[in-house]
Amino acid sequence: MTDGIATTSVMGQQLTHIGASVMCPACSSVGHIVPIGPRFPDGWMGQKVALEGDKVSCGCYPMPTMLPSQSVMFEQYDGEGLSSMGFAATDVAALTKADPEHWVRFKLDEQGSCEGLRCTAHFADGSVEEGVIDSRNTVAFDRPNGSPCRKVEIHFEGEKSSHDSVTERLISAILG
């Protein structure tokens, strides 16, 4: 892990978050943490906490799985909590044993680096996921239910959302 929430630590280790940079020892590249399964909506210090089982979007296939660095802090969900996040209580087993082949990966066909750009993917099942473009100009989303992606929005610094197309945003990024 190369990024963490500076003001929050557990057993001397900074708490890490979704989108944080992680050095992958297998492919020697920097990837970003991709969320797998439900998580509490509030997060810590404005960040969604990375959990055991999350993936790292790097150069590896399949994406590596995050391992825990401590065992004193965890998130636990009950049926009511899951349903408030849009999951059925029966989805828990499916989410924890998700097929590693159910993920969507995008690669931007760019000469320069788009690393660090945030994006939002909209899926056919109505779900929306946030991601961060990595050093290889790729972003990956785990899709345990296999739902196809319908639209991807690229967000620039300080931008929350826009009605521009992905192509318009990429052209804007290229031209500066």
Image (cartoon, rainbow, N blue to C red):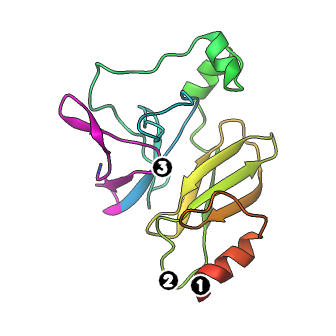
Query: Which comes sooner in the sequence, label 2 or label 1?
Result: 2
Secondary structure under tag 1 reads helix
Task: Give whichever of 132, 59 is nearer the camera.
Answer: 132
The residue carrying mark 3 is 63
Q: Residue at x 56, y 41 (%)?
A: 100
Residue farthest to the left, as pictured: 12
In the drawing, what numbered circle is on residue 174?
1
Q: Quadrant of the C terminus?
A: bottom right
Q: Amino acid at mark 2?
A: Gly
Q: Is residue 68 above or below residue 155?
A: above
Mark 3 packing: few (<14 Cα in 10 Å), some, or many (20+)? Answer: some
Secondary structure under tag 3 reads loop
Q: Amino acid at mark 1?
A: Ile
Query: Which comes sooner in the sequence, label 2 or label 3?
Result: 3
Direction from residue 113 to residue 165 in the image, left or right = right
Mark 2 packing: few (<14 Cα in 10 Å), some, or many (20+)? Answer: few
Question: Mark 3 to mark 1: distance in Å?
Answer: 28 Å
Question: Mark 2 to mark 3: distance in Å?
Answer: 24 Å
Query: Is disc 2 in contact with disc 1, using a CB cutoff of under 8 Å?
Result: yes
In the drawing, what numbered circle is on residue 112?
2
Q: Is residue 6 magenta?
A: yes
Q: Which quadrant would residue 124 be assigned to in this image?
A: top right
Q: Residue at x 60, y 73 (%)?
A: 108
Which stretch did the figure color magenta?
Answer: 2-29
Q: Is residue 104 above or below residue 166?
A: above
Query: Is disc 3 in contact with disc 1, using a CB cutoff of under 8 Å?
Result: no
Q: Position of residue 160 (x, y in %)?
A: 64, 57
Residue farthest to the bottom, as pictured: 175
